[in-house]
Image: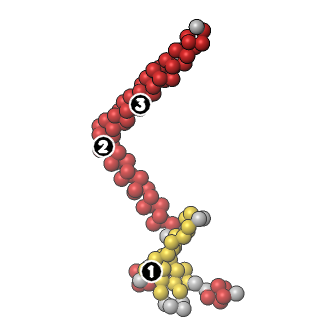
């Protein structure tokens, strides 16, 4: 008799109560997601403004970090940025567009040694 009661309790836990708890958790997550969506819709303009400010700060930081170099082997000029140690980027820039005070003259003899 005692085993039957234990079996009924175990059955109730695993097949009735625990799934109901899971449903409540799923419903709670669904409600939280709906709240987040409503918040985003309500604050859409503020989010756009913050993104614009972030983009502006990023553009300012990147442009301020640019350096310009003249390669005497090719007579070409390049902008480069190495503001992050893990990456560097290089782009061709017409030499006449670079103010002389910003231009670095590459010394080939230093490179080849």
Give percent across and percent down for residue 42. 29, 37
Residue 39 shows up from this direction: no
Between marks 1 and 3 in the image, the one whose residue lies nearer the viewer:
3
Which mark sits nearer the N-terminus, 3 or 2?
3
Label 3 SS: helix
Q: Quadrant of the image for the C terminus?
A: bottom right
Give percent across and percent down for residue 89. 51, 72
For residue 45, side relative to residue 2 (left or right): left
What's the distance in space between the residues labelled 2 and 1, CA to CA?
A: 38 Å
Which mark sits nearer the N-terminus, 2 or 1?
2
- The residue sitting at 41% across, 83% down in the picture is 94
Q: Nearer the viewer, residue 49 or 10?
A: 10
- The residue sitting at 33% across, 48% down in the picture is 48
Give the residue at mark 3: 26
Q: Nearer the viewer, residue 27 or 107?
A: 27
Q: What scheme was used to colour the molecule? A: secondary structure
Give the residue at mark 1: 92
> Which of the 4 quarters of the picture holds residue 55?
bottom left
Give the residue at mark 2: 44
Q: Residue furthest top?
A: 1
What's the distance in space between the residues labelled 1 and 3, CA to CA?
A: 54 Å
Give percent across and percent down for residue 13. 51, 19
Neighbours of disc 2 within 10 Å: few (<14), some (14-19), many (20+)? few
What's the distance in space between the residues labelled 3 and 2, CA to CA?
A: 27 Å
Residue 19 shows up from this direction: yes
């Amino acid at each position: 008799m005692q085993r039957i009661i234990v079996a009924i309790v175990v059955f109730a836990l695993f097949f009735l109560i625990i799934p109901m708890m899971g449903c409540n958790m799923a419903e709670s997550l669904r409600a939280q997601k709906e709240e987040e969506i409503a918040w985003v819709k309500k604050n859409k303009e503020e989010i756009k403004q913050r993104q614009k400010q972030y983009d502006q700060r990023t553009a300012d930081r990147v442009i301020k970090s640019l350096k310009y170099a003249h390669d005497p082997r090719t007579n070409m000029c390049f902008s480069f940025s190495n503001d992050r140690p893990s990456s560097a980027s290089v782009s061709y820039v017409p030499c006449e567009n670079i103010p002389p005070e910003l231009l670095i003259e590459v010394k080939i003899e230093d490179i080849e040694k």
